[in-house]
Amino acid sequence: MTNSARASARGAGKRRRLAAAAARVLHEQGAERTTIADIAAAADVPVGNVYYYFKTKDELIQAALTEHAGNLAELTGELDKLADPRRRLKSLVEAWVGQRDTAARYGCPTGTLAVELDKRAEGGLDVEAGRVVRLLLDWVERQFRELGLPDPDDLALTFVGAYQGMSLLANALRDPEVMTRQGARLTRWLDSLDGTGERPAG
Amino acid sequence: MTNSARASARGAGKRRRLAAAAARVLHEQGAERTTIADIAAAADVPVGNVYYYFKTKDELIQAALTEHAGNLAELTGELDKLADPRRRLKSLVEAWVGQRDTAARYGCPTGTLAVELDKRAEGGLDVEAGRVVRLLLDWVERQFRELGLPDPDDLALTFVGAYQGMSLLANALRDPEVMTRQGARLTRWLDSLDGTGERPAG
DNA sequence: GTCTATACACGGATAGAC
DNA sequence: GTCTATCCGTGTATAGAC
């Protein structure tokens, strides 16, 4: 292994640590209140060194978004192993409810970030956030389509919207129980949908 | 009228203008990215003068929250004139859909503010934001209770959560149509609820 | 009560030694 | 590739003239 290759390997490791730390810290503190120093400390990388990997704070935020997209892809990849699309969606709800304490404390990672980035429209980061939301929306829509339900895109909006809404309320009220109760309701809703027609308002 | 009384009247006017401007600008730009100067300019008050009315930025944010609470009280006050609670809720949905362009551009005023303030937990402003959300929640719950529906508190969480969720998605996707479509779904849901029992997941 | 000037802190970003 | 020192812009808040 050459010196530069070894250096790259170390570098890639640090880069990855920074991206992961960015995702975590930005979720907990919000994009505006998080400083480069915060992320550097969380990643255990010297502050000044950060700029070698990411030229601007926006690039770090972008990395966090990519990280979130990756986490999502990993999760849906697991769920895809289940045979029944309805089962997949119900498992997703279970995963969300499992994160209830985090949701009550910090909200949905992508949702809260999207809210903040929409007010930071300069670097086009708002569009990027929308893209990550779209990833989830599209995957959910695919499940409803496989179930043969009408208007799968609307159903996906309702489903993901319900998640975003309950996360926001759980966060605003600082109450994890909101996730539990609304999660149960969402599961019952999934059960109530049949392949022949649509129930009003989901 | 004494001099000081006249001064108070002028002062109260400016104070009110500042509070209203704070509510508007904080919604559009977000709490962190909004400077005192921004609010002063929007209220047409000289920057340096702001501190006479509000000692800190947090006090200005608090004033904006009070403003939002006032707007909400005004709206529900109007809706209360309608005889049927179901009609009241449907009118509320109509009002939300009527704001679809604003929602797509800036999200729900209280919701987005609550998200941001939750990451600004020092001054206890996060709790204040939760209080405003509670006002809406309580009013909605009262309507469901009047309709004789079971678990009115859960229904209120579903209803308000749906609104917060659709606002966030409309905002993230920058698409007002999300509000229209999900609003219609919410209306159909209200119609599907009867006084005798509860439909699964709303 | 109104407004100007400014102190002061903080955070993003860069230069350049190692 | 790593790290320190520092520049510089910006924004909150205050002092004090009017």
Image: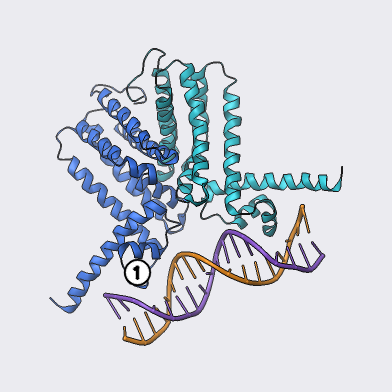
Chain colours: A cyan, B blue, C purple, D orange
- Under mark 1, the amino acid is Val
Task: Give the farthest residue toward the left.
Answer: B1
Q: Is residue A91 left or right of residue A14?
A: left
Judging depth in this view, the residue of A38 and B142 nearest the camera is A38
In the picture provided, is B140 more to the left or to the right than A100? left
Is the residue B7 above or below the residue A140 in the image? below
On the rendered image, what quadrant is the N terminus of chain B found in? bottom left
Q: Residue B195: x percent and y percent?
A: 23, 24
On the image, which quarter does residue B94 sit in?
A: top left
Q: Chain of mark 1?
A: B
Residue found 24% across the figure and 21% down from its top: B196
In the picture of the structure, the residue carrying the numbered disc 1 is B50
Q: Secondary structure at mark 1?
A: helix
How far across and down, in percent of the image, does residue B19 sit? 30, 60
**Whether residue B91 can be seen here:** yes
Task: Decide: is B36 above or below B120.
Answer: below
The C terminus of chain B sits in image quarter: top left
**Which residue occupies 38% across, 46% down?**
B106
Q: Is residue A177 visible?
A: no
Q: What is the count of numbered marks? A: 1
Residue at 64% x, 51% y is A42
Tell which residue pokes out farthest to the top in this image: A196
Which of the 4 image quarters holds residue A69?
top right
Task: Please state the horizontal and vertical placement of residue A131, each as a whole percent of the image.
Answer: 51, 37
Give coordinates of residue B121: x percent, y percent: 46, 54
> Does B151 sit left or right of A136 as displayed?
left
Classify 10 Å Cα crowding around label 1: few (below 14), some (14-19), many (20 and above). Answer: many
